Structures are given as C-alpha cells and as structure tokens.
Image (cartoon, helix red, strand yellow):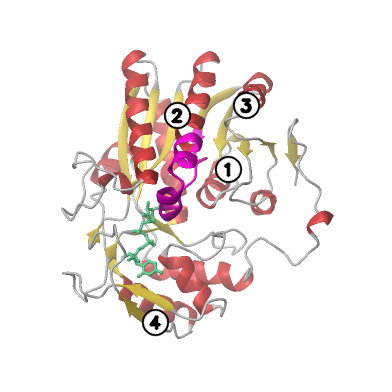
Amino acid sequence: MAILVTGGAGYIGSHTCVELLNEGYEIVVVDNFSNSSQEALRRVTEITGKSFKLYQLDLLDKEKLEAVFEENKIEAVIHFAGFKAVGESVELPLKYYQNNITGTIVLCELMKKYHVKNLVFSSSATVYGMTDHVPIREDAQLGAVNPYGRTKLMIEEILRDLHHSDQTWNIAILRYFNPIGAHASGRIGEDPTGIPNNLMPYISQVAVGKLERLTIHGNDYQTKDGTGIRDYIHIVDLALGHIKALEKIKRRSGGVDAYNLGTGKGYSVSEMVDAFEKASGKIISTTISRRRPGDAATCYANPTKAKEQLDWHAVRGIDEMCQDSWRWQQNNPTGYVKKVNKESRTPVQSNAAVFFNV
Ligand code: WQD
C-alpha cells in the first residue's frame, strides 16, 4: 500500500518524501512542476537510496489523476499541491480558487470513489488572519485576510463537511507556521520562483550575493525590537509532523482534527538577521520600509495539541535552521536550475508513471 503525495516535488513535499521513505513507506508522487523541479525528486532518491513512482499531472486533470488510483494501491494521501503566494493570490484570486479548491475537490472525489479516506491536508497559520492573540491555539478565531488564506480556510470547511457526510473520513489538517531551513545534506531546500516573498529565502539570497539588501517591513510594531515576530519551524521538524499525523489517522476509524505545527517560540526579523549572520559569517545589509499590508505584529503557535495527540514537537533550534538554510543556499546559489540548455532535460512522460530509481 502506498502513500500518495500531491505536490511532492515542492519545498515541504520533497522534505516529507525523504522522511516517508526513511520510515519505510512506499510513496507515489504527483506534481505538475508549476512551482517545483523534477531535480528535487531526483535528489530525494539520492538522499534516501529509495525509488518511487512519479506522475506529472495537474490535479484538475481528473482522467490522469484517476489512472494513479487505478494503477496503485493508495492507503492515504498527503495533499500539498497548491499555489501559496499571498501577493499573487490578491492579483489572481480565480487562479487560486480554481487551482487550490477545485483541485482538492477532484482529489477527494477520486479518494471517495477508490475508498481512500485517510487524508493529511497542508493548511497554514494564515487561516488565523491578523490575530495578535498569542500563542495561537487551534480553537482561536479563524479569519483569513487574503485569497490564498481563504482557499486554505474553505478547504478546511470542505473537509469538515466531507467528514460530517461520511464519518469514515479520517482527516488531519496541519496548520504550518513559518517553515524554513533545509535537509542537513544541503541537497534539497527552498527554491522560490523569482524574488522571494518570504523572509528566510530573501535573507539567504542576500547572504549569497544574489540580492543586494533585505528590506525590513516595518520596525514600529509593539514588539521587543519593533520588527515582526513569527514562529519559524525547521522544515525537517515539519516533515516529521506529517509522519506523526499519518500514524495518528491510521490508528483511528474516522475523524477530522486541526493541528498547529509550530515551535511555540517567536523570533523577530532582527533576531533572524542576527542568527543568519552568525550561521553564515556574512553581513546582511538591511533597510527599513513601512509595514507590509496584511502583516500581523506577532504570530506564534501553541503547539500543545500536536504534542499531546500526535506525540510530535519541534526539536531543531533557530541556529540549526539558519545553518541548514545557508548550506543549501551556498551549495545551490541558483536553486535546482542548473545553467544547462533546457532542451537537454528529458521531460517526464506525462501519461505514465516514471520511476525514480536509485
Ligand atoms: C515573516 C516576517 C515580514 C520578507 C507567509 C504567508 C503564510 C505562510 C508563511 C504559506 C514578517 C518580514 C518578510 C521581507 C521582511 N505561507 N519580512 N522582509 O508573512 O509570516 O507568512 O509565509 O502558507 O501564508 O503569509 O512570512 O516570511 O513573508 O514574513 O521584513 O523581505 O518577515 O514583515 O514580519 P509570513 P514572511
């Protein structure tokens, strides 16, 4: 029996594939590579020494996705596939609703048809909106403030309705805080398209000389040093949280629960700059701008529920997060894209499985 990983070539997906394979799971990956690279999956095989099947497809292509269920015995799905750029979602809301929500509905319809009811869903702390009531518990007021966050919130509601209609659905909703860092090998990591929106990839690109300086969005918040505070969590801790969530839903006959995947500690932008300078030995040039619209001053998790119910908690500290981020960035200054002629890459056959062999 295999675990189907949608969006398995992405930053969180690829790190979770490594941990699934390390745990001995058989996996099947589907990805349309709209915001990820096949190279990440090749390196997952390199790191783990394990093979797995890949189907290049879009979740909106129901016929191609159904073939995956026809050709493989799927016991559970970890669903990462989705667009996640807040700014882009404001400019292109229909693209986000179509891709994130309709894609999830197509997936759930096929899961239902093939009697696969175990689902781990990739949600986000963004569903808590602009709350400053910290630490944030799972029963906090929900209220997304942008189309991206609203897709995550709506999908959570869809999954609750699905479970209400059929109690055998077995769903874990994981609300990520701020994932950063990389696998210790430095072979896989965060590879944003274009100019990074998020803090850590921006800082690491300044450190490696790809970007000139970091613009700190506001230093007049009511926080220890005036800059925004967030709950940064190591990507490997986050990936391991998915393994624990999978084990939890496999132990029960049905249910739907949301869990915060965060450390429970908050660090300011200035503290992150200092930590990265310490890890990299580089000076990060900065400038201050006005606040970024939609940013909360402070956001960090109460991770108690995941500790108690998933037997999971984050163990990697901020120094390790920065060291691992820097190792990835240093070893891969242009991310996964090599300076090779694009034509020289053999495209994945989209209508059949491709084996990533050791
Ligand atoms: C962190 C802090 C910024 C960039 C976002 C999404 C959320 C989730 C995680 C998907 C804030 C400051 C940032 C920069 C800065 N993604 N900052 N200069 O906004 O907490 O969350 O990513 O689920 O949905 O909203 O993360 O990394 O963008 O910002 O000063 O160039 O860094 O103001 O205080 P955020 P972030």
Query: Circle 4 — which element?
Result: strand
Which residue bears the numbered disc 2? 119
Which residue bears the numbered disc 4? 286
Please tell me whether residue 6 is drawn above or below residue 322 in the rendered image. Answer: above
In this rendered view, identify the residue nearer to me: 232 or 310.
232
Q: Earlier in the sequence, mark 3 or mark 2?
A: 3
Give left or right: position of 53 versus 209: right
- Percent of width and height locating residue 187: 62, 61
Q: Which residues are magenta?
A: 78-99
Residue type at mark 1 is Gly
Q: Earlier in the sequence, mark 4 or mark 2?
A: 2
**CB of mark 4 within 8 Å of CB of mark 1?**
no
Disc nearest the viewer among 4 and 2 = 4
Alpha carbon of mark 1 to alpha carbon of mark 3: how far? Answer: 14 Å
Determine the residue positioned at 43% across, 34% down: 120
Which residue bears the numbered disc 3? 65
- Percent of width and height locating residue 315: 37, 57
The disc placed on residue 8 is: 1
Query: Circle 2 — which element?
Result: strand
Residue type at mark 3 is Leu
Q: Does label 4 point to a residue whose CB lies under 8 Å from ligand 1?
A: no
User: Is residue 92 located in the magenta-colored stretch of the structure?
Assistant: yes
Residue type at mark 2 is Leu
Q: Earlier in the sequence, mark 2 or mark 1?
A: 1
Determine the residue positioned at 20% across, 70% down: 221
